[in-house]
Image (cartoon, helix red, strand yellow):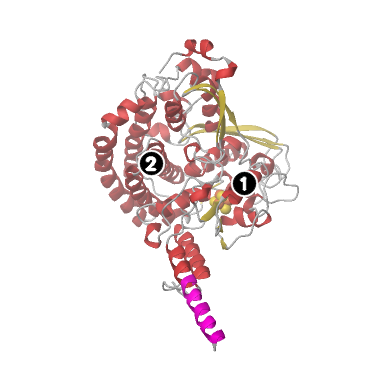
Amino acid sequence: MEALVDTSQIVKFAKLDDLLALSRANSLWPLTFGLACCAIEMMAAGGPRFDISRFGAEVFRPSPRQADVMIVAGTVNKKIAPAVRTLYDQMLEPKWVIAMGNCAISGGPFVFPGQYAVVEGVDQLFPVDVYIPGCPPRPEALIEGILALEQKLTGKRRWPVVKPPQ
Amino acid sequence: MIASNDIPSRTNPQETFVLNLGPQHPATHGVLRIKMTMNGEYVIRAEPVIGYIHRMHEKMGENRTWAQFLPNTGRIDYLSALHYNHAFVGAVERAAQIEVPRRAEYIRVITSELNRISSHLVWWSAFLLDLGGLTPLLYAFDDREKILDLLEGVTGSRLTYCYFRFGGLCNDIDDEFIQGTRTFIAQMRPRLKMYRELVTDNIILRKRLEGIGPISAEMCRKYGATGPVIRGSGVAYDVRKSEPYSVYPEFAFEIPVFPESDSMARYLVRMEEMAQSLRIIEQALGKLPPGPVMGKVPRVLKLPPGDYCYAVEAARGRFLVRTVSDHKEFPYRVKLRTPSFSNLSLYEEACKGMMLPDALALLGSLDLVIPDIDR
Ligand code: SF4
């Protein structure tokens, strides 16, 4: 019988986890780290029209130690790669990464036979949770990416999915 | 501020330290790194370290046909993509002697000037963000979205446009665009007035910028600085007037020049330029000629051998494309002369002996786009 009591306690802990995940999902603080063109769309997402703060992700932190999610917005080349890696390492757990734009996903338009500078995808440096394709992705796409990350954290989607017109 | 000749007495190596600004630092607007040797709060030496966003544009130019390089031009200085489009198609058109219809040139001017305003708006918000004011960003991005809506309607993208083609444009503008642009001009004029009352006349901003970061006309010439930087130093150099291209000679507009040479002068130049751009757009819409927007272009483009240049006034200064053709399908060489690179070069000399916060105000007033420096 005593074993049963233990089980119920485990159930409670699981609920606390849900609560934690919910609060984390609603206050994802991104790292202020713009690399190239995509960063302008990231700024636009924080601007008045798209207003990313509706989803709790507007608190851009300049210090990696205060940030939860790193939005890699732009091209990562071989010279900046160690710095990006350091920033990732400096972030505190739990941490997530969004690869925004084709450059961050795969090197984007700058990959050609014989290329010598760009890193072909930030997933070669650290694990990536959400990929947002586009060159640059629209701010709506970034918001969708953040919602996808929320879904990954909480296990369910709390906002309606927008279906593209047929 | 102290004069730079006071510095030698302060350069005792035992009293200095190195401050590493960047490559991840909000005030460098990207991934510029500046190695600063400091004595207390004073900058003794500031050494920019570049290359953190080198994207091989010039090398890529040699690896593809002229037409395939066109999308790259929108990504060098992504804030003024249309000017860069213009310079590249201009160089190729000059080489292949392609005739561009007048309507296309007019539309090029209209869209380029809209792009210039949107670029200056981003600079304005980012610069004021550096100085500690967040609110202007919210105003500026609101206006910028209106421009992006207009441009998206005709070009199909929001930021990295690839709208101009050799011999013209890929799309004609419609009545909706013309009407929208007229409405935008009417809305933007009072907004500029509001910006003046809200920010430009603000005593805190004035105290923060006036007399800070003087750049003499001599120094601009030495380093090849162009754009609002040289116009803020009292030199009326603007490619649109001094080497006229496209249909710019047909419009009446002024080149704002401020002789004070400080950060405030550069600020005022850009604010005034936005009003002048509105003027150009209004005139161009008024006398927009009818006709096609695409000239006659050979299906396979092979340029005659030779060396071709085309310069435009981008939002940050003079942008020049030089292509060398050896009568193959691919260019032999594509050289890009970008304004941000020259504007950054003078930074080391200009910020000697400044306080660190003033040095950052100077950096912001140069309006750098880092991929434009590294290419
Ligand atoms: S994906 Fe496109 S827009 Fe984004 S950084 Fe790369 S080139 Fe620029």
In magenta, the rendered stretch is A2-17
Coordinates of residue B172 in the picture (x, y in percent): 44, 53
Measure the alpha-carbon separation of dots 2 and 1. Answer: 29 Å
How crowded pointer 1 is (Cα within 10 Å; few <14, some 14-19, many 20+) is rated as: few
Kindly indicate the quadrant of the structure image that contains residue B323.
top right
Query: Is B298 left or right of B196, judged from the image as shown?
Result: right
Front one among B309 and B349: B349
Image quadrant where residue B321 sits: top right
Amino acid carrying label 2: it is: Ser
Magenta segment, prevailing SS (helix, strand or loop)? helix
The one nearer the camera, B305 or B193, is B193
Report the residue at 24% width, 36% height from top.
B197
Evaluate whether label 2 is on the same chain as label 1.
no
Task: Give the residue at x 56% y 56%.
Answer: A101
| Circle 1: residue type | Thr
Q: Which residue is mark 1?
A: A86
